[in-house]
Image (cartoon, helix red, strand yellow):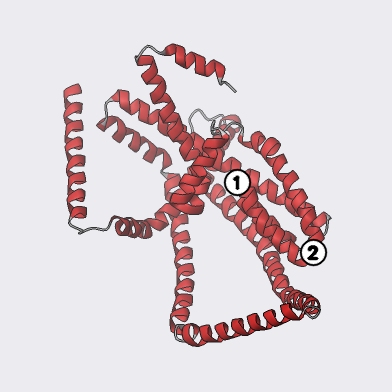
Amino acid sequence: MDEKRTDRFKILFVLVITLILFLIIYMAFGKINVNSVISNFSRILMPLIYGCVIAYLLKPLCNWFDNFFNKLYHERMHGKKDINVAPISIFISMAFGLLSIWLIMSMVIPQLADSVIKLFRQLPGITDEVTSWIQTHIAENTTTQKYMEELTADLTDNLQSWLKNTMIPNMQMIVSGFSNGIFSIFIIFKNLIIGIIAAIYLLAGRKKLSYQAKMILYGMIPQKYADIIFNEVKYADKMFEGFLSGKILDSAIIGIICYIFTLIFNMPYAVLVSVIVGITNIIPFFGPYIGAIPSIFIILIADPVKAIEFLVFIIILQQFDGNILGPKILGNATGLSSFWVLFAIILFGGLWGFTGMIIGVPLFAVIYDIIRKLVKSGLSNRNHDEMITYYEEEFKK
């Protein structure tokens, strides 16, 4: 049995090495563009990627409904075996997810649009006030007045030149870009619809797919290494599920608290700034600062005094979130120090942008756990158990 497994492993190893050499040869002769291939595959598989994300976010809810209905069946109907409650659980979970999004959008989008419209309506008045203030103060200084007149003339000439030489000749390109933007929005909605359908199939077959993956793992790799990979995948799943769901809940609570405060103290653009603060709070470490800067600027345009009050509130709110609410919801979810959290956000944010800043922390926590286990195993094999004991006792939190 071991010889057959070893032969399969050797065959798989030879196939992988052959594929790698083939790709290297192709890249060496410039026949393949790796970035282009990855981009094309991502574009083609984007509906399935959406489906995987939706299914993964709804999986805990679906599992909870499965357990609830099975328990209800055993207690009320005195059933001895589990029944197939998957269709009911999937339907309720999907309906709950879509209904939650619809309710949030129906409440947020109208008020968000109203806040943006009010902001643009106030801009001309603010501009007139600033212009009047500048003219009043400049009138007292002839040198400054002359300089501002020259600067205004230069700006006017540059604007006319830009409109004549750049804007008008490229108008067709701008219209084309706008059309492409509309088409991209349509593609996103199409991918989302297909993604929802794919998520239903993934949720329905999640146990079967999980068992098939386990069969492939143990069929191709020796059991010792398969156990290690299996346990690490379980740890990664637990890490991502707990961190993402907890962070979303934490950010939603922060957004609601911010909205209540802005309403009580009659802050301008309450919905707009609350949405910004809530969404950006999903990003660990940098999120509160990323959301606070544009929010303060938006309030500052309408009411400078309110902007100062909002700044004080945001500082207090983030202290509450970082020291009380966040740890209460997330617990010690990642086990990473502040430095490694910062490192993970910078690294994966640079690689994958906004998405990387969100998933970077749990992903790096998994990598950190693997390295920690490898180091611990290496020290144990080299009879340095005293170093492990010292580390665990000295630096235990």
**Residue 83 against residue 289 in the figure, above or below:** above
Measured as percent of width and height from the top left, residue 41 is found at 33, 57
- For the question of whether residue 1 can be seen, the reply is no
Residue at horizontal 70%, vertical 82%?
146
Residue type highlighted by circle 2: Asp
Q: Residue at x 50, y 46 (%)?
A: 346
Percent of width and height locating residue 80: 50, 27
In the displayed structure image, the side of residue 260 where residue 208 appears, left or right: left
In the image, 43 versus 339, the foreground residue is: 339
Residue 266, given in percent of the width and then of the height, sits at 82, 59
At horizontal 21% and vertical 50% (from top left) the residue drawn is: 23
Tell me where residue 208 sits by quadrant.
top left
Q: In the displayed structure, would residue 121 be above or below residue 196?
A: below
Residue 300: x %, y % from top left: 75, 62
Q: Which quarter of the picture shows residue 72?
A: top right
Q: Residues within 10 Å of mark 2 (few under 14, many from 20)?
A: some
Q: Amino acid at mark 1?
A: Ile
Image point (56%, 32%), residue name: 337
Category of crowding for the residue at label 1, using alpha-carbon neighbours closer than 10 angstroms: few (below 14), some (14–19), many (at least 20): some
What residue sits right under mark 2 in the picture?
A: 303
Pointer 1 with pointer 2, Cβ within 8 A: no
Residue 248, which numbered label?
1
Which numbered disc flags the more N-terminal residue, 1 or 2? 1
